[in-house]
């Protein structure tokens, strides 16, 4: 069966009846819930903390395709998300990370176009209801958010290819990861206009890469 891809205005059978106490997708996820710069900005702004503060309790660093990236922390033998409360509800639901917001959908990048697909069988809730993709995501300024995701994907893809092309060059990997973490995570974001800040950092990051810095 071929995969069906959706745009933001399409209807998809993803509604899970508000979970009703189910938290299966909030535990046992290991390092798979990667946090992009928008996720970190959301957490910093709403929790009134810094990236360093998040690393102390809520976030950990992991290696994915040669890149050191932050992922959502898990705790205990069941590896429950650090933001899952005793009632099995998300304590940061209003500003939860993008991958959490997306589930049970996935993303597909087709050049500069972002599309979505349903992860069949990923959600254990029965009787899923149809919902418009953009309503399910519930992200303000969705067009700007999608444009950010595309550019972030391209940055990561380019860096991954550079590392894969020189797998024995540990110094190159170190330089790439130090710069990546500094530009997009460690440097504090202002509460206003994330997208403008990200674009400015991305331009600087890619400009310095072109000059060999």
Image (cartoon, rainbow, N blue to C red):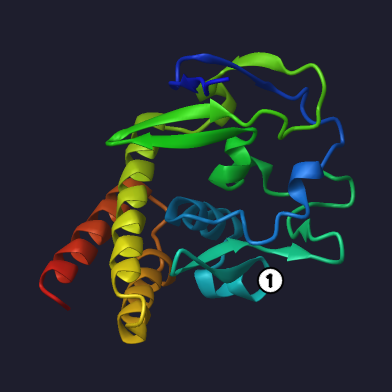
Query: Is residue 149 at all visible to an observer of this figure?
Result: yes
Q: What percent of the width, then of the height, locates residue 46?
A: 57, 53
Q: Is residue 55 left or right of residue 69?
A: right
Residue plotted at (65% across, 13% down): 130
Q: Residue furthest front?
A: 1
Residue plotted at (64% across, 33% down): 104
Give the quadrant of residue 120.
top right
Q: Is residue 59 left or right of residue 121?
A: left
Looking at the rendered image, the quarter that the C terminus falls into is: bottom left
Q: Is residue 199 left or right of residue 86?
A: left
Residue plotted at (38% across, 74% down): 177
Relative to 92, does residue 128 appear above or below in the rendering? above
Q: Residue furthest bottom?
A: 171
Relative to 210, does residue 131 appear above or below in the rendering? above
Looking at the rendered image, the quarter that the N terminus falls into is: top right
Q: What percent of the width, then of the height, locates residue 129?
A: 71, 14
Q: Residue furthest left?
A: 211
Q: What percent of the width, then of the height, locates residue 195?
A: 33, 47
What is the count of numbered marks? 1
Q: For mark 1, what is the residue?
A: 57
Secondary structure category for the residue under label 1: helix
Give the quadrant of residue 65.
bottom left
Give the quadrant of residue 30.
bottom right
Mark 1 burial class by Cα count in 10 Å: few <14, some 14-19, many 20+: few
Q: What percent of the width, then of the height, locates residue 117?
A: 53, 27
């Amino acid at each position: 069966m071929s995969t069906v891809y959706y745009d933001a205005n399409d209807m998809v059978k993803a509604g899970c009846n508000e979970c009703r106490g189910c938290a299966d997708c909030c535990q046992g996820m290991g390092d798979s819930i990667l946090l992009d710069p928008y996720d970190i900005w959301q957490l910093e702004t709403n929790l009134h903390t810094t990236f360093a503060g998040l690393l102390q309790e809520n976030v950990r660093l992991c290696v994915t395709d040669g890149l050191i990236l932050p992922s959502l922390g898990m705790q205990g033998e069941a590896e429950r998300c650090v933001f899952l409360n005793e009632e099995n509800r998300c304590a940061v639901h209003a500003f939860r990370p993008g991958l959490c917001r997306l589930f049970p959908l996935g993303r597909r990048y087709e050049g500069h176009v972002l599309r979505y697909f349903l992860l069949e069988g990923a959600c254990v809730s029965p009787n899923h209801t149809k919902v418009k993709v953009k309503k399910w995501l519930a992200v303000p300024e969705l067009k700007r958010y999608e444009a950010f995701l595309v550019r972030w994907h391209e940055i990561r893809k380019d860096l991954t290819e550079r590392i894969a092309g020189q797998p024995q060059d540990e110094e190159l990997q170190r330089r790439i990861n130090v710069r990546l973490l500094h530009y997009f995570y460690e440097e504090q974001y202002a509460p206003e206009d994330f997208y403008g800040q990200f674009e400015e950092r991305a331009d600087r990051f890619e400009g310095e890469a072109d000059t060999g810095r």
